[in-house]
Amino acid sequence: MTPGMSIVAYLIAGVFFIRSLGGLSKQETAKNGNLFGVVGMVLAIVVTAVTWLQHGASVTAVAVLGGAIGVGAIVGASMARKVEMTGMPELVAILHSFVGLAAVLVGLSSYMGPQAHAAGAHTAAELHTARVVHQIELWIGIAVGALTFTGSVIAWAKLKGTLSGKPLLLPGRHVLNLLIVAGIVGLAVPFMAAEGSSGLVWVLAMTALAGVLGVHLVMAIGGADMPVVVSLLNSYSGWAAASAGFVLNNDLLIVTGALVGASGTILSIIMCRAMNRSILNVVFGGFGTGESKTSAAPVDGEVREIKADELAERLANAKSVIVVPGYGMAVARAQNSVNELCRTLRDRGVKVRFAIHPVAGRLPGHMNVLLAEAGVPYDIVLEMEEINHDFERTDVVLVIGANDIVNPAALDDPGSPIYGMPVLEVWKSAMVVVSKRGMAAGYAGIENPLFFHENCRMLFGDAKKSVDALVTAVRPKG
């Protein structure tokens, strides 16, 4: 295979990756998007293996590489098939950590291995320039990779529940972050001056600092911001891959990493705008950080409970019903039961729609995927900005396992840690029913005044069992 042919093959693979991202932007085309991604990756691996052989690699080495890829593919496929939707955010976070770790290992091996960057340099000046550029690429790639690796591991532990979702706020943490960044930049000076591989100690020291920065940044982020954090780490993993591409002089890896990095950044910005916040505010602040200048208003009042048979009657007689799914629905694995309730109500002539908040669940699009998996029609699943104005014309809103995204304190209480975050204004409906196991606070760790509103009723119990009871009661007898 000539260099020109490999470049063309990489371009074709890049087109497949672009088509993959385009397909993943809509639920209807997501399967085709995944297929495009698989085809592009297989093409990239084959071209890389052939090119490697042409550059003198032994068949044994290629076989070992193929074996490693095979083992990784088997493990990845097994994890993807076994993971529950409730565990999908943790899986995504830990996969991001692998990309970061790979970038670190690529950078270290390139630094200690043959100086391939010197190819094509004919004069001392050219050789020096090539060396400087290569070392800068190494430094940035390893730093971004280490930050992505440790930050993703912490995100995985928070999402899994191994670590608390509450933010860790050290005194003077912003100053500490600046000092760590200054240390990463400062260590580059002796590294650039080192000859051969004698600068390894500086690289390792920088890697440790970048890893500490990743831990500290994610530990300081509050629970309600975790969907944005996952999206942001996705962006970091893309930039880490692109950096590895520069180190390896691999055009496809640069393009692929840039695509992932840019798309992750755009998604993070979109989510932050939907939350009326900036990325900097998420990374260095975070909902639920307890840094409000005033304390949140005390929540008190009477909690009004409703039973399944009474709610079923209200649902059956309603003209318009909106369902608001949250992470509790995923935990209870209630999405199929919710779809059955939806179909039963629609068969009775009730207008049923779903309202999705941008940060519902623990992952961007988490609720959309759950509902699509259960077979809920795409056209009745609406985003917050499309449906928020309809609540005041809705007879019943059924909130299933959601809390922070329907909390009126975000609009009414300047002392609340989530003040300023747009929420689904469910309390404007004629009746809102919240399905929860109990009165526990949401992931952001704050109380919800909605539960004490005059038109709010609480349906206590497991979400799946509660919805199954509703389906039985709503379904026409005989």
Image (cartoon, rainbow, N blue to C red):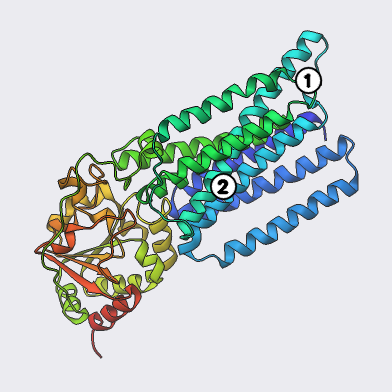
Indicate which label's residue lies in the foreground, 1 or 2: 1
Q: Residues within 10 Å of mark 2 (few under 14, many from 20)?
A: many
Please indicate, yes or no, whether residue 351 appears anywhere in the rendered image.
yes
Side of 139 relative to 317 (left or right):
right
Report helix, strand or loop for mark 1: loop
Numbered tag placed on residue 195 in the rendering: 1
Foreground residue among 275 and 448: 448
What residue sits 68% from the left and 28% below the top? Answer: 202
Residue 201: x %, y % from top left: 71, 31
Side of 230 relative to 456 (left or right):
right
Foreground residue among 401 and 151: 151
Residue reaching furthest left?
454
**Quarter holding residue 437:** bottom left
Q: Residues within 10 Å of mark 1 (few under 14, many from 20)?
A: few
Pointer 2 residue: 96
Residue kind at label 2, given as amino acid type: His
Residue 73: x %, y % from top left: 69, 57
Residue kind at label 1, given as amino acid type: Glu
**Quarter holding residue 270:** top left
Side of 288 relative to 40 (left or right):
left
**Of callouts 1 and 2, which one flags the residue occurring earlier in the amino acid sequence?**
2
Residue reaching furthest front?
171
Q: Is residue 185 above or below residue 471?
A: above
Foreground residue among 31 and 103: 103
What residue sits 56% from the left and 52% below the top? Answer: 94
What residue sits 86% from the left and 46% below the top? Answer: 61
Residue 69: x %, y % from top left: 74, 52
